[in-house]
Image (cartoon, rainbow, N blue to C red):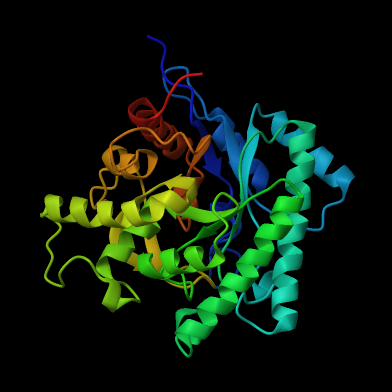
Amino acid sequence: MASNNYPKLHNATWPGVVGKGAPGAEPIIPLDTLLKLTANAEVDGQKFDGVDLWLADPHISIDSSKDDVKRMADHIGSFGLKVGSFVAPIWGGAGGGSAMGDADDVKRFLTQVEKACKIGQQMREIGIRPTGGVRVDSSTGVEAWDTDPVGNTNKIADTFREAGRIAQHYGEYIVAEGEICWGGMHSWRENVKLLELVNMPGVVGYQADMAHSMLFVLGANAEKDRILAKDFQWSDKAALDAAYHQVADALRPWTLDFHVAQNDGTTFGSGDHEKTGRHCQIDDPNGRLDVVKHAGYWLRDDRGELTRKMRHICWDGCMFPNAVMEQQETWNKVLGAMLKVRDAHGWRE
């Protein structure tokens, strides 16, 4: 029987940029290097289908002209790859602003979202981008949010709702990635609360990263939302499964984009990036996730049926060391794991 061909398998390009390039950090990895490594990965004759993109210099400028976008689409296509989800550079240091900030902050945030949506629409029209959303976060820290939790969550919801309206205009959708470092998105309950306030299902949803979402069970940056006991032992697989299932059950109805990842249960920051859930290699002996099994918590509903909501899934190795990222074998192993996830939780069309 032929193997599954959906969801399509993508590699992320932003790990070449995030946490890199700042003083004392490792250098940025060029987009072409990542495209070549992705395109050259192969397991039993199967390859990656595409890439998810970072829409900021030095990879792809958010201010790209139509000609620039066409050239980049042709260039990526020359590697035999499609394009999926985008990361919009909505942070203050990248030209954006806080989603709970003043009017100027919010305007800059939404301007970056609109630029990303325009590029997304153009790439769809070109034909290289059959699927994918525009990724955002609250662009604010947990301490700043905590000065007024209710008021600030309402502000973030207002900004995300307007981002959703912009996305709809361009035929796009917004995926908000919850991580322990983003104020108002730093726990599973806060993410659910925020998305319910936005109230635009199918337009503003959740981007689930397996590693980041797992940290929610430990109550990192949100002790009141901890699920596992403080004296939890990682050897208790059943307790981890139950806790992680609780997080996935709460956020799955909102999930529109999904990152396969491994996590060792610790936090990590690199360069100018705040500490968040540490991604680790797929075969890291300290990895706490059963990647294939736990991916199913997101890709199947509470009855165990396939949701088929994600037309593509992506690997995220954010803040991997350059020495790891620049080895072809790293991506062969990742692709092998992604294929196992698709074999277990995918389908054929």
Q: Is residue 48 visible?
A: yes
Q: Residue lying furthest bottom in this view?
A: 147
Give coordinates of residue 119: x percent, y percent.
77, 48
Q: Is residue 155 left or right of residue 122?
A: left
Residue 290 quadrant: top left
Q: In the image, is 302 to the left or to the right of 306?
A: left
**What quarter of the picture does the N terminus occupy?**
top left
Number of marks drawn? 0
Task: Please name the residue shown 45% across and 86% down the image.
Answer: 146
Given residues 128 and 173, the one toward you in this image is 173
Image coordinates for residue 59, horizontal then vertical, percent: 70, 52
Residue 161 spot, x, y in % from top left: 63, 65
Please tell me which residue is depicted at 40% across the width and 50% down the height of the picture: 252
Q: Is residue 220 left or right of residue 152?
A: left
- Residue 95 appears in the picture as rendered: no
Q: Position of residue 64 (x, y in %)?
A: 82, 53
Say above or below: 143 vs 306: below
Q: Is residue 17 above or below residue 331?
A: below
Residue that lies at the very extreme toward the top in this rendered image: 1
The structure residue drawn at horizontal position 33% and vertical position 28%, both measured from the top left corner, is 344
Residue beneath the point at 32% across and 52% down: 249
